[in-house]
Image (spheres, grey):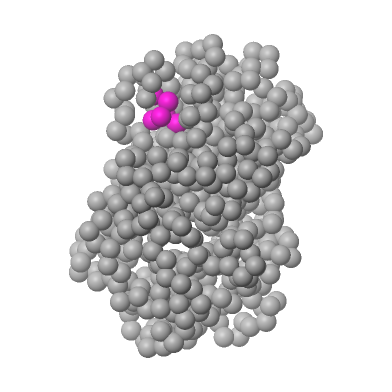
Amino acid sequence: MYDYVIVGGGSAGCVLSHRLTEAEEVEVLLLEAGTPASERGAVKDPSRVWELMESDLDWAFKTEPQPTMNGRRIDWPRGKALGGSSMINGMAYIRGHPYDYDTWAELGNEGWSYDDLLPYFKKSENFQADGDMQYHGTDGPLSVSRGDNPEDLTPSEFQEKLVEAAREAGMEKNLDFNGERQAGIGWYHSTIRDGERHSAAKAFIEPVLGRPNLSVETAAHVTRLTFDGDRVTGVVYEQHGQEHEVEVAGGGEVVLSAGAIQSPQLLMLSGLGPADHLAEHDIDAKVDLPGVGRNLQDHLRVSVAYETDEPVTPRDPDDFPDKGARYDRVLTGAFERSSPDLPAPDIQYGLSAGLDPEHPTEGYSVAALPLRPTSRGRITLASTDPYDDPIIDPKLLSTEKDVDDIVTSIRRAREISRADALDDVRGEEARPGPDVETHEEIADYCRDTAESGYHPVGTCKMGDDELAVVDDDLRVHGVEGLRVIDASIMPNLISGNTNAPTIAIAEKGADLLKQSR
């Protein structure tokens, strides 16, 4: 018997477990389908991030063929380990723009404005970089730095060229995307400590594993929720071939933190979801929740790239003899509005040496992510087998606006790449290539090459409309004793990477649970 059973040991589940067990009388069980992996070399070393995709630490999901992207199936990596996707992500720490959260509040979600959430961003943060300290915290578990250590913040000569190129294209220099303003060109903050990845597991779980009121079970695949009437009483999970059932104590709660793909999957397998879809799989609908699995959103990432006559290294590899040529966590990035009348930036950029991960010192690239997709997809069940991947259909580029936005982002990325500051290194355009110029040619290039930005959200959206799954206290509509606390509750995708917002959601979610108790 536990006070809280948390399903999913990703960023949200790690934060919840840490915060809830601060009260010694509260018993928490954290269930994670993956295994501990913090000490693996490829996990620890930021330069080896690309080795983690499609490894045993990746669920390695794929979308349905996307007709609007020339029939391609898009890779959707998700972390399968204690620490979740914070174990395999690019470690960029971006909160988004105040407009994002104020919009959530304007939709009727009380307590979710930017001013409401800023204290939670600060609470989790151990800030070790330069920035406006009124926006940052220094006492939290999660290290946020710039580069491999706080003392080494010096960008390379080539990174300075990239910044100057963006300034020529109209951007101002900005050294803190998480501070007073998001727009501008500068260097990302990263979840790195002493040159190593500082995942949610490292920050929030490993330091408290000795707490007697915290139980962590890994390789534990939750298969369904259990009920007593309209109250969720616990979960069933399988571990090493054996089935286990655990219950929450009276007044306790089950919390789903399995992410935007698997939280809705588990709800549907347990009879909470669209009644018509559940009937297709002979699942009795305990509660008809039409929004479960709907409202799926993700950023798309597409890039331009240029050859160079000489190898381009982001920093001198001799400075990092054990890290490899690609070791560079002083990452150059930018945010901008494509139109001055927009309330917040709508394009994010990553500017780097290398044509791609396989060619880290050949040429350079500018990746662009349109930040306000209007396409909405859906997660549905492939079968009643909890080990089968769900069907992921994001319907990418299915609106005219999304196509226009991604074409605009390529045109702007080209402007940056062709700036005078890069004249002495720039060679031929490797992609999309000099023959790709018209709106439709660029759009087709994007359909052929764009990839996920690894930011899926929205499938258990917060609100009180007909597609809402949770209320603004993150309680699932129609049942008692069940909440969803992870990226799936976002009504709208935020302006940037989603790990920092997910951690803030969990920080606030932990307080909501404590207040209810």
Residue placed at 52% from the left, 44% from the top? 115
Q: Position of residue 352 (x, y in %)?
A: 40, 70
- Give the vertical position of 302 relative to 417 (above or below): above
- Give the vertical position of 439 relative to 330 (above or below): below
Camera-side residue of 280 and 201: 201
Q: Position of residue 54 (x, y in %)?
A: 46, 51
Residue placed at 55% from the left, 42% from the top? 487
Q: Is residue 212 left or right of residue 74?
A: left
- Give the vertical position of 99 relative to 207 (above or below): below
Q: Is residue 196 left or right of residue 483?
A: left
The outermost residue toward the top is: 250
Residue 137 occupies quadrant: top left
- Give the vertical position of 424 relative to 498 (above or below): below
Camera-side residue of 190 and 344: 344
User: Can residue 460 be seen at all in this image of the molecule?
Assistant: no
Magenta region, main secondary structure: helix
- Residue 36: in magenta span: no
Q: Position of residue 471 (x, y in %)?
A: 65, 32
* Magenta-colored span: 16-21
Residue placed at 68% from the left, 39% from the top? 108
Residue placed at 50% from the left, 35% from the top? 508
- Residue 17: in magenta span: yes
Residue 35 occupies quadrant: top left
